[in-house]
């Protein structure tokens, strides 16, 4: 009994520090807290010091690492003395504070793009692309594909009143759409493609747009990556007998484009491509590899091997240089290509229970990324801890795609035929 009383009486002197502004600042004075306190206990103590009208969830860091066990266990594991006054940094917890009303589709939602702050793009197994201005508000339908859409992306912005959208499909083609986003009205506008991109010999799995350019790249089940021009070139003649209906329903000529360049090297399906720099494309494949391609030469300058078939790749984090990928096991892997002489991941996150379908870095953070899985969950990660910061489990079936939107929201689609938006996420 005496021993138990001694453990219960263990206390630690701490100072709470933060980069947050008022009303989330506490005086930088030493306070005494129990050593057995966990993150939730620390959050409760901090809320009592802040005297907020509404309690706020916080996360805590010591020496740049997030606390995910009792304070005493953390100090013991890290070899940190409990005799000195500890400085504990606190940040707002990364978790959705609101779930928007789901936007129902006619079939599986297989693709999503949240790179525009004004709109969300979705691609669906019904062969249609959709543009959403807000939850439940579909402003445009992009039509013409004869197979399921597997990937969708904003190709470039036409300015305040228009965008170009690229879609990739199981019908072996890509399509390009010019969309007048300034149109208003209660009805949804149906838009036909101004250009069809043909050349892949199998389903197109992924499309990505060039950063600060007018090209798109695509990965296919034919094991190749193609690079295409999105411009309406005068040298490309209209296809005889093929017309499209514009926004005013008048028939217009439809162009067909051929690939400018083809990258060859993967030996199985190229499941995902991203274009993080003007002249560099990254790809991942069911051949277990991530590759980096020089757009000018068409040569691959980096090969990373995971040992598993890969479904998704993204580049971001510190220096916009970290490579995240996931696939046919529950592990999200992160590589740092800047580290010479090693091809092993620098981080591995393994809280999912099924295949990983999507991963995306947060655009303004060195630490944060998300992953989506066939287990029906989306997990938010911070490189400073091995445990997920938050789990979004609003989907009722496999999650097939996910992205960040407007910096504080996650948009996702799945086999439950819904686009879901989780908002109010604080990324410090």
Image (cartoon, rainbow, N blue to C red):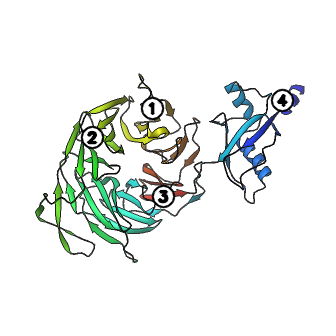
Q: Nearer the viewer, residue 8 or 360?
A: 360
- The residue carrying mark 4 is 7
Q: Residues within 10 Å of mark 2 (few under 14, many from 20)?
A: some
Mark number for residue 295? Answer: 2
User: How many angstroms separate mark 4 from mark 1 (CA)?
Assistant: 42 Å
Q: Residue 190's quadrant in the figure? A: bottom left
User: How many angstroms separate mark 1 from mark 2 (CA)?
Assistant: 21 Å
- The residue carrying mark 1 is 336
Identify which residue is drawn at 28% across, 33% down. Answer: 300
Q: Residues within 10 Å of mark 4 (few under 14, many from 20)?
A: few
Residue at the farthest bottom position: 185
User: How many angstroms separate mark 2 from mark 3 (CA)?
Assistant: 35 Å
Quadrant for the N terminus in the image: top right
Q: Mark 1 against mark 2, which lies toward the viewer?
A: 2
Q: Can residue 354 be spotted in the picture?
A: no
Mark number for residue 428? Answer: none
- Name above or below for residue 329 compared with residue 93: above
Q: Mark 4 against mark 1, which lies toward the viewer?
A: 1
Q: Mark 1 against mark 3, which lies toward the viewer?
A: 1
Q: Can residue 315 be spotted in the picture?
A: yes
């Amino acid at each position: 009994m005496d021993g138990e009383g001694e453990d219960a009486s263990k206390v630690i002197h701490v100072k709470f520090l933060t980069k947050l502004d008022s009303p989330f600042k506490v005086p930088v004075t030493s306070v005494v807290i129990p050593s057995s306190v966990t993150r939730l206990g620390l959050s409760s103590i901090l809320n009592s010091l802040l005297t907020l009208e509404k309690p706020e969830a916080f996360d805590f860091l010591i020496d740049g690492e997030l606390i995910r066990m009792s304070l005493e266990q953390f100090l013991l594991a890290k070899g940190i003395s409990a005799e000195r006054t500890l400085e504990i940094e606190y940040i707002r917890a990364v978790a959705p504070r609101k779930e928007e009303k789901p936007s129902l589709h006619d079939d599986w939602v297989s693709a999503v793009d949240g790179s525009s702050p004004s709109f969300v793009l979705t691609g669906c197994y019904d062969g249609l692309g959709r543009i959403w201005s807000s939850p439940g508000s579909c402003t445009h339908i992009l039509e013409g594909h004869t197979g399921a859409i597997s990937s969708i992306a904003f190709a470039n912005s036409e300015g305040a009143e228009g965008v170009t959208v690229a879609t990739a499909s199981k019908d072996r083609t890509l399509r390009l759409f010019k969309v007048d986003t300034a149109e208003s009205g209660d009805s949804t506008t149906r838009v036909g493609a101004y250009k069809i991109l043909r050349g892949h010999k199998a389903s197109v799995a992924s499309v990505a747009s060039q950063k600060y350019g007018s090209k798109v790249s695509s990965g296919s089940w034919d094991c190749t990556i193609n690079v295409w021009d999105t411009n309406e070139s005068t040298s490309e003649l209209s296809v005889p007998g093929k017309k499209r209906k514009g926004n005013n329903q008048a028939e217009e000529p439809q162009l067909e484009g051929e690939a400018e360049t083809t990258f060859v090297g993967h030996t199985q399906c190229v499941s995902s491509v991203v274009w993080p720099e003007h002249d560099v494309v990254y790809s991942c494949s069911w051949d277990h590899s991530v590759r980096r391609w020089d757009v000018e030469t068409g040569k691959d300058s980096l090969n990373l091997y995971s040992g598993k078939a890969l479904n998704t790749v993204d580049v971001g984090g510190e220096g916009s240089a970290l490579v995240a990928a996931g696939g046919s096991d529950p592990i999200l892997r992160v590589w740092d290509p800047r580290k010479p002489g090693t091809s092993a991941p620098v981080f591995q996150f393994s809280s999912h229970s099924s295949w990983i379908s999507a991963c995306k870095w947060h655009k303004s953070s060195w630490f944060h990324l998300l992953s989506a899985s066939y287990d029906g969950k989306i997990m938010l990660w911070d490189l400073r801890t091995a445990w997920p910061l938050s789990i979004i489990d609003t989907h009722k079936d496999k999650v097939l795609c996910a992205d960040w939107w407007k910096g504080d929201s996650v948009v996702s689609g799945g086999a439950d035929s819904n686009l879901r938006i989780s908002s109010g996420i604080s990324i410090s």
